[in-house]
Amino acid sequence: MTPTPPHPAHSVEEPPPFLRSWRRVYTAVLLYLAALIVLFYLFARAFAPPPAPPHALSWIPPRSGSPA
């Protein structure tokens, strides 16, 4: 019986082709996601409609009595 080759999960991992370590790759991904979140937040604030003034709906009379 021939010995089976080692399982790929137990072999030594190769470094990624860029940034030279997996820790740097994960850090870069997290920084990228954080930057996207901040940019989308700023974009949403810049192009959100202005809030309605408090008196904008004051012409609607209040409901009288209880609902039927």
Image (cartoon, rainbow, N blue to C red):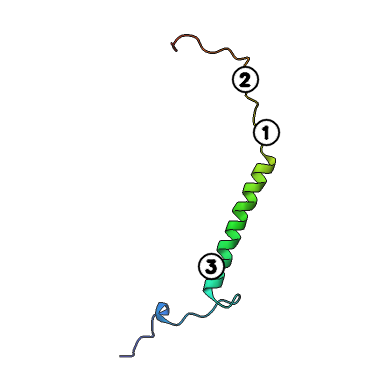
Quarter occupied by the C terminus: top left
| Amino acid tagged 3 | Tyr
In the picture of the structure, the residue carrying the numbered disc 3 is 26
In the picture of the structure, the residue carrying the numbered disc 2 is 57
Compared to residue 8, the image places residue 47 above or below, namely above
Task: Look at 62% across and 57% down and name the residue there.
Answer: 35
| Amino acid tagged 2 | Leu
Of the residues under marks 3 and 2, which one precedes in the sequence?
3
| Amino acid tagged 1 | Pro
Q: Position of residue 55 (x, y in %)?
A: 64, 21
Disc 3 on helix, strand or loop?
helix
Please, which residue is most extreme toward the top here?
Answer: 65
Would you say the residues marked 3 and 1 are in contact, meaning their CB atoms lie under 8 Å apart? no
From the viewer's side, name the closer residue of 2 and 36. 36
From the viewer's side, name the closer residue of 23 and 18. 23
Compared to residue 4, the image places residue 28 above or below, namely above
Q: Quadrant of residue 25?
A: bottom right
Please, which residue is most extreme toward the left here?
Answer: 1
Lateral position of residue 40 relative to residue 68, left or right: right
Task: Look at 41% across and 77% down and name the residue there.
Answer: 9
Please, which residue is most extreme toward the front here?
Answer: 54
Compared to residue 21, the image places residue 4 above or below, namely below
Q: Position of residue 20 (x, y in %)?
A: 58, 78
Q: Which mark is residue 50?
A: 1
Disc 2 on helix, strand or loop?
loop
Would you say the residues marked 2 and 1 are in contact, meaning their CB atoms lie under 8 Å apart? no
Closer to the eye: label 3 or 1: 1
* Crowding near the residue tagged with mark 1, few <14, some 14–19, many ≥20 C-alpha atoms within 10 Å: few
Disc 1 on helix, strand or loop?
loop
From the viewer's side, name the closer residue of 68 and 62. 62
